[in-house]
Image: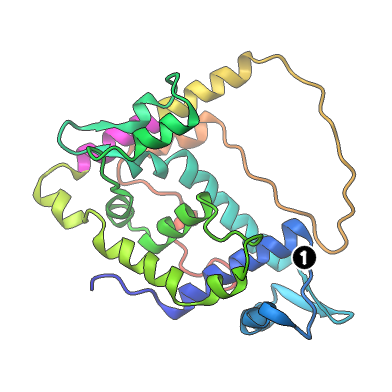
């Protein structure tokens, strides 16, 4: 087995899901947990030890340090959706990308079916390794994007902290199209180059569309933030993405093994 998920990374990923639930939805778990929340106890205690949470009036509440860690997650997630997801459906035989058709008139259901066409391969793990990124980070982002850690589902606490979902992530990393295979075929540089150009072209198209839209009146909602402010998804202009024309470039946010807490 090539890839092994380190325990510290598993704890980090679980903790990030919990931080998102606590900060974004103000779900403050009591110190005296009951029911399925008991599965979360050790991870909540780790977050307290790391300074991301503190105990106030018998509940776990977020700190500014915890919010900063969540901001890093959102920055990574934004880059994942805008850039790395391009490599989730690549036609290795013809050299095309499913996302070349993203602006077609397909329905949502038709688009999902198209993405899963057998001619497309998911090469995100290989691209991550090519760029020096921990592949588990990319697969974790894909699970977030697919809402695989749905905190509204029954027994989500058991699912999040149990072995099954993390074993699945390990299996995905170890059975995905490998960097070695794509290097042997001599196509990894072309895939990254062409995918980068496509991603940046789609980002430019989306920015142009947004600029052409008439401004709408912004509605401001008053939200009472008892401990820390929620985190908003970042929005980067086209100029931010310029360095990604270099196939070897990767944003520094992906390369820090222990951003704040780990």
Count of numbered tags: 1
Question: Could you tell me what secondary structure mostly forms the magenta stretch?
Answer: helix
Foreground of the two, 98 or 47: 98
Q: Is residue 53 above or below residue 228?
A: below
Residue 222, position as x, y percentages in the image: 90, 44
* Side (left or right) of 163 relative to 18: left
Q: Quadrant of residue 100?
A: top left
Image quadrant for the N terminus?
Answer: bottom left
Q: Quadrant of residue 219?
A: top right
| Magenta stretch encompasses residue 196 | yes
The stretch of residues the image draws in magenta is 189-199
Residue 102, position as x, y percentages in the image: 42, 27
Q: Is residue 187 above or below residue 143?
A: above
The residue singled out by tag 1 in the image is 27
Residue 247, position as x, y percentages in the image: 30, 41
Residue 93, position as x, y percentages in the image: 15, 36
* Side (left or right) of 144 relative to 99: right
Foreground of the two, 55 or 130: 55
| Residue at (62, 13) in percent of width and height | 212
Q: Is residue 149 above or below residue 117?
A: below
Element under label 1?
A: loop
| Magenta stretch encompasses residue 56 | no
Foreground of the two, 93 or 218: 93
Callout 1 environment at 10 Å: few (<14), some (14 to 19), or many (20+)? Answer: some
């Amino acid at each position: 087995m090539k890839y092994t998920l380190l325990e510290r990374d598993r704890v980090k990923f679980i903790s990030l899901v919990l931080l998102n639930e606590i900060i974004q939805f103000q779900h403050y778990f009591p110190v005296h947990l009951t029911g399925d929340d008991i599965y979360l106890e050790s991870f909540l205690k780790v977050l307290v030890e790391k300074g991301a949470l503190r105990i106030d009036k018998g509940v776990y509440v977020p700190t500014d340090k915890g919010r900063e860690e969540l901001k890093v997650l959102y920055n990574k997630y934004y880059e994942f959706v805008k850039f790395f997801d391009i490599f989730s459906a690549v036609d290795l035989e013809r050299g095309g990308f499913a996302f070349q058709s993203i602006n077609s008139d397909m329905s949502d259901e038709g688009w999902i079916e198209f993405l899963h066409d057998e001619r497309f391969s998911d090469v995100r793990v290989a691209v991550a390794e090519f760029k020096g990124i921990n592949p588990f980070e990319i697969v974790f982002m894909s699970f977030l994007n697919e809402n695989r850690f749905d905190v509204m589902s029954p027994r989500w606490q058991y699912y999040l902290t149990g072995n099954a979902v993390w074993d699945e992530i390990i299996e995905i990393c170890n059975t995905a199209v490998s960097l070695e295979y794509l290097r042997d075929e001599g196509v990894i540089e072309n895939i990254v180059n062409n995918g980068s150009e496509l991603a940046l072209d789609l980002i430019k198209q989306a920015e142009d569309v947004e600029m052409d839209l008439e401004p709408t009146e912004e509605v401001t909602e008053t939200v009472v933030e008892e401990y820390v402010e929620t985190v908003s998804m970042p929005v980067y202009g086209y100029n931010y993405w310029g360095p990604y024309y270099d196939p070897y470039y990767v944003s520094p946010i992906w390369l820090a093994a222990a951003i704040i807490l780990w």
